[in-house]
Image (spheres, rainbow, N blue to C red):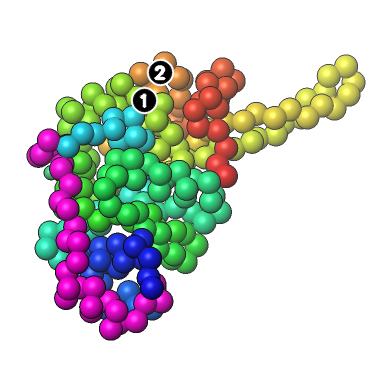
Amino acid sequence: MYDEQVRAIARDAMTSGESLNAISKRLGVSRAALRDWRDRGERPARPSECPRCGSGSLDKPSYSHLLGLYLGDGCLSRHRRDVYALRIACDDVYPRLIDEAEAVVRTVHPSRPVHRVQAVGYTAVVSYWKHWPCLFPQHGPGPKHRRTISLADWQREIVADDPELFLRGLFNSDGCRVANWATRTVAGQLKRYEYPRYMFSNESPDIMRFCQWALDLLTIPWRMPRPNALSVARREAVTYLDTFIGPKS
Ligand SMILES: [Zn+2]
């Protein structure tokens, strides 16, 4: 017997238009079983209420976090029957961040399973829902850095209430905490000092402005060593970011 979780994943994948062959290989379930689940249509997915166009509720802190992840390494793609896949690409080097991304997606959209799809060098955390475009109205054709990205007023309000989690999402996708070293001679002795700093890189000037805005909300000083790279290097600022971001793992 297949367990309910595998059935749920298979049903979601079939709804999204993935081929029976591909699902069969991915989940190790026979095509006959998949056809059976599809044709019997058991337990049709209960449409979950959308917090934007329906009466669903939104976990705002988690949404602020997810918005940061989406703007950094996320995308939406349309599948059959107007179902959209939200994909957050997570580097395989940081398993804790993959767990975290999965948990955040589940908190924002709790009624359906969250999938992990292995790609070369990264894991995509995937969730299917008709209403992802309601939550990410900046979705559009082409890469984010080639089009204008703006935040809706309701998104700005949520980020302004939780800039820390928004920044956590941004820095954990397109940023990093780097440890720079320098040596100085003190009383005739060579001493080695660590100068940690945070970097955020993004090709979209709009997304870069959102990062600057969220840092400004927390009065964290930043500078732009390059047009597509932001740096936070002052010691107190780094210490503050450490309280809600920290090194990747
Ligand atoms: Zn909706």
Element type at mark 2: loop
**Residue type at numbered disc 2:** Leu
In the drawing, what numbered circle is on residue 76? none
Give the prevailing secondary structure in the magenta stretch. Answer: loop
Q: Nearer the viewer, residue 44 or 234?
A: 44
13 on left or right of 53: right
Q: Nearer the viewer, residue 106 or 217?
A: 106
Quarter of the picture containing the N terminus is bottom left
Q: Is residue 91 above or below residue 118?
A: above
Extreme residue toward the right, this view: 188
In the drawing, what numbered circle is on residue 163? 1
| Badge 2 vs badge 1, beta-carbon distance below 8 Å | yes
Residue sitting at 83 percent across and 19 percent down? 186
In the drawing, what numbered circle is on residue 218? 2
Extreme residue toward the front, this view: 1
Disc 2 CB within 8 Å of nearest ligand 1 atom: no
67 on left or right of 91: left
**Residue type at numbered disc 1:** Pro
Residue 32, given in percent of the width and then of the height, sits at: 28, 83
